Amino acid sequence: PPGLLQLPGESNIHPAPATAGGSASLGFLPPQTARGCCRHLSSMSQPLNSSRDASNPPATHRVLITNKHGEKLVGLLHPTGSNRIVVLCHGFTASKSSGVIVDLADAIIKQGISVFRFDFSGNGESEGVFQYGNYRKEAEDLHSIVSYLYQEKYDVAAVVGHSKGGDVVVLYASLYDDVRMVVNLSGRFYLEKGIEERLGKEFLDRINKEGYIDVTNKSGNVLYTVTKESLMERLNTDMHATSLSISKECSFFTVHGSADEIIPVEDAYEFAKHIPTHKLCVVEGADHCYTRHRKELSDAVVGFITSKKVPKNVILYVVLCSIASGLLAPLISLR
């Protein structure tokens, strides 16, 4: 990734202490704005000061954190003066600058809670090779981020992931017991589904024969390559077993749009059935990226993180699962 950004007239770039997983660096970045789901942001303005009102949001710091594989992960730290912080994780082929992530960051910051958003290895500005599956490695990336923030004396209040990032935070909750709130936004429960739409029919025969599949756009340009190893990693990631292994001490929240065109809302109900203590919020009419429902999404996530009542313009269900008996308590509508 490029070196620390230094804006004209700025000289206040500070090195951060090394973490257990490697080194980290800090620098100032200007805020960026966009409202698409997976669109990367490019517009920049002069850096802002650290006050919290809407006209003067806090300054943003660019941070480099080395993961366990020696790759530098690029993140943006939005400090509000509070040591309570939320980590945001992007989805497939997206980045820390996707619109849904930026909008969530804005909403959380307005509550006085600090935010950290970053690029997984092989994505955005971070080092590494893009992989189709890579769920476990991305969970390890997230652990490097969380460990760094704890070392910097932050209190990691929640990890939030959208789409594939939702699956990553589910896996993270099953592997690590260091974050008390986990939020899954439109994650996929049945990872064996949704593959044919990207890779085409008979994808298993093709990848067994060739060892890889190149995914192209309408112009024939290669967008990314799917290796047999990365495909098998996805197919062997079991969200059912993963969900059952999440601690009952973990507060878990899933948000899903009822009109999701990429991952059906039924997947959200499966998470609700199998995660020990779970709250499910279905946003009526919302698509996969909450294109016309960003406020409803932000209100639901902020309401959960701050333990406030979720607004009436979304449907909230509390689902309590009895894993020992295998019985699912009735869904209780709080609308």
Image: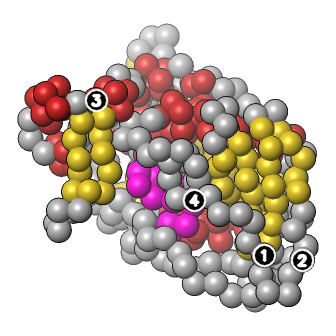
The magenta stretch spans residue 91: yes
Residue 220 is one of the magenta-drawn residues: no
Q: Are marks 1 and 2 in contact (CB under 8 Å)?
A: yes
Question: On residue 11, which mark appears?
Answer: 2
Q: At label 4, which amino acid type do we have?
A: Glu
Q: Find disc 1 in the rendering and name its residue.
A: 6
Spatial CA span between label 3 and label 4: 25 Å
Q: Earlier in the sequence, mark 1 or mark 4?
A: 1
Q: Give the SS element for disc 3.
A: helix
Report the span colored magenta.
90-100
Instruction: Find residue 178 and report its image quarter.
Output: top right
Task: Find numbered disc 1 in the image and state the secondary structure of the residue it sits on.
Answer: loop
Answer above or below: position of 269 versus 40. above
Q: Give the structural element (helix, strand or loop) at label 2.
A: loop
Gap between marks 1 and 3, in whole Å?
A: 41 Å
User: What residue appears at the point 71 percent right and 63 percent down from the top-left corner?
Assistant: 3
Q: What's the residue type where badge 1 is placed?
A: Gln
Residue that badge 3 annotates? 228
The CA distance from mark 2 to mark 4 is: 22 Å
- Is disc 3 surrounded by few (<14), some (14 to 19) or many (20+) residues within 10 Å? some
What amino acid type is highlighted by mark number 2? Ser
Measuring 8% from the left and 35% from the top, which residue is drawn there?
Answer: 202
In space, the residues marked 1 and 2 are separated at their CA atoms by 7 Å
Whichever of callouts 2 and 4 sits on the residue coming sooner in the sequence is 2
**In front of the other: 237 or 281:** 237
